Amino acid sequence: MKLCYNEGCAKGCSTLAEDIELCEKYGFDYIEIDIDMLNEYLEEHTIAELSEWFKAHRLKPYGLAAVHIYQELFGAKDTAGKNTAFCERFEHALKNAEALNAKNIIIVPPMSDSDLYIGFKDEIIDDCANALINIADMAAEYDVKLAFEPVGLKNCAVRSIAVAKDILYIAYKDNLGLAPDAYNLYLNGGSNDFSDVAALSANEIFAVHIMNADDVPAAERGQDKRTFPDRGSAVDVAGFLNALKAVGYDGMVSVEMFRPEYYEKDNEWVISEAYNSLKSVLEENNCL
């Protein structure tokens, strides 16, 4: 497997220009570029400059993270203004991904502002499939793949690999796949059952996110509880990696955290710890 760094890890204390230098220094194979951080970079630089940097260095861009869809997207209840704004943002991301030869964009399902996402399962599946069909058609013009990432929190429309697969079965596009995330799957009921991952085929997995987390009561679980993969005790990291190995997956594994206390650290500390932690768990589980 290949070592990848997701810029969410130090988003609060770093910049894209700093991250690529540090990821190169510490030995990452790939970087997942945060779209907001890319847009900030482009305020003072060009996409051509960034492309030339990657051509001259070992580190390569794996993809962009992330684009959030909403349930009404391209549906009967969508509005012209909201749809136009989404399409402009998405096409901007597609153009940048193509310019960087980063042929992957993480797609996040609809999220509710409240504590619970309200909707019938069949309606959610049909609406998400319709949205994914349309954005997959847009992405096909740019030769960019889309990795759909279920999020186990109760305010997300799609919380499991099983439901995500039902959606992709309807959408059925070659450039649509899945992005299993160890903690996002754990958040769906606090389960370390990764049998749904083990039931996938390797070619259905377009990206992988890995981390551990603090073991806290269900009511306290959130994205801010993520830890480096070799710390924390909530997620069965070995079980997650074994499920990936069982299907023959040997692609990128991206360390991804959104922990506020890490944002208060020096960005070089975050990136060096992320690399050492990821390398350690991959070596321990015979994934390198």
Image: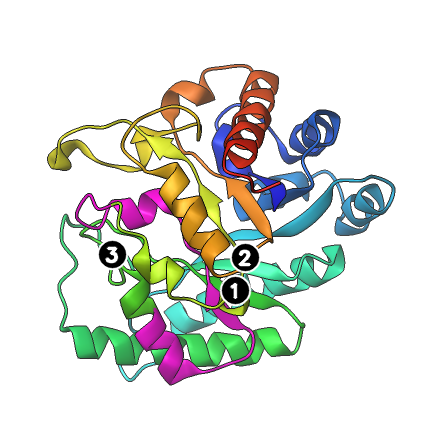
Q: Tell us which disc is closer to us: 1 or 3.
A: 1
Disc 2 target residue: 249
Q: Which mark is residue 267?
A: none
**SS at circle 2:** loop
- Looking at the image, do the residues carrying marks 2 and 1 touch, with CB atoms under 8 Å apart? yes
Question: Disc 2 and disc 3: Cα gap in Å?
Answer: 26 Å
In primary-sequence order, the first of circles 2 and 1 is 1
Query: Residue 105 is drawn in which quadrant?
Result: bottom right
Q: Is 187 in the magenta?
A: yes
Q: Is residue 9 left or right of residue 164?
A: right
Question: How many residues crowd around disc 2 within 10 Å: few (fewer than 14), some, or many (20 or more)?
Answer: many
Q: Is residue 83 left or right of residue 120?
A: right
Question: Disc 1 and disc 3: Cα gap in Å?
Answer: 25 Å
Give residue 204's position: percent from left, percent from top: 49, 68
Disc 3 target residue: 156
Task: Determine if residue 79 is in view.
Answer: no
Q: Is 39 in the magenta?
A: no
In primary-sequence order, the first of circles 2 and 3 is 3
In primary-sequence order, the first of circles 1 and 3 is 3
Q: Is residue 199 left or right of residue 122?
A: right
Q: Amino acid at mark 3?
A: Cys
Which residue lies at the image location 73% right of the left edge and 58% below the top edge? Answer: 101
- Looking at the image, do the residues carrying marks 2 and 3 touch, with CB atoms under 8 Å apart? no
Q: Amino acid at mark 2?
A: Tyr
Q: Amino acid at mark 1?
A: Ala
Q: Tell us which disc is closer to us: 2 or 3.
A: 2
Which residue lies at the image location 17% right of the left edge and 73% below the top edge? Answer: 121
**SS at circle 3:** loop
Q: Is residue 232 above or below residue 174?
A: above
The magenta-colored residue range is 165-191
